[in-house]
Image (cartoon, grey):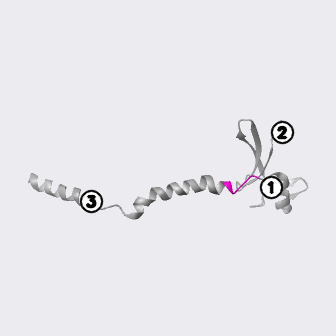
Amino acid sequence: MGFLFADAWAETVHTTQQPSLFEGLLPLIVLFAVFWFLFVRRRGKAPISFDDYKRKYPKHVSEGKVGCYNCGARDIHIQVAETSPRSRTNVHICRQCGSELYRSKVTR
């Protein structure tokens, strides 16, 4: 009886399947996707200044008020971002959709 169990166990151990091609490539695909998102995709979205924003989206800037180019909301949040240890900028973000609109210098 003990031998029957050992034989059945040996068959299951030795009959494992080889991983499919997709299973072997999956970690590489995930690594490539993370690399692409962090380095390639973000590099294409350079921050723009207020003057650039005003030229690019003139109908969203009127009478000193700024609106979001994406959703049209006028509720804009200013977040201070440190771009380096000695440099900080204001990032103007739409509160409704979260789109980054433009960046400006921090006034002290």
> Which residue lies most toward the left here?
1
Q: Name which residue type carries label 3.
A: Thr
Magenta segment's dominant SS is loop
Residue 17 in percent (x, y) is at: 29, 62
Q: Residues within 10 Å of mark 2 (few under 14, many from 20)?
A: few
Element under disc 2? loop
2 or 3: mark nearer the eye: 3
Image point (50%, 56%), residue name: 30
Q: Which residue is mark 3?
A: 16
Q: Nearer the viewer, residue 1 or 105?
A: 105
| Residue position marked by numbered label 1 in the rendering | 74
Q: How many residues crowd mark 3 within 10 Å: few (<14), some (14–19), many (20+)?
A: few
In three-dimensional space, the C-alpha distance between marks 2 and 3, rounded to whole angstroms, equals 65 Å
Tell me, yes or no, if residue 104 can be seen here. Answer: yes
Characterize the local packing of mark 1: few (<14), some (14-19) or many (20 or more) Cα atoms within 10 angstroms: some
- Whether residue 44 appears in magenta in the rendering, the answer is yes
Quadrant position of residue 68? bottom right
Q: Nearer the viewer, mark 3 or mark 1?
A: 3
The amino acid marked with disc number 2 is Thr
> Residue 4 appears at what percent x and percent y?
11, 56
Q: How many marks?
A: 3
Inspect the magenta stretch and tell me whether residue 8 lies in it. Answer: no
Residue 42 has which mark?
A: none
Q: Is residue 8 left or right of residue 63?
A: left
Q: In the rendered structure, which disc, 2 or 3, sits on the residue that comes first in sequence?
A: 3
Residue with the mark numbered 2: 107
Tell me which amino acid carries mark 1: Arg
Highlighted range, magenta: 43-47
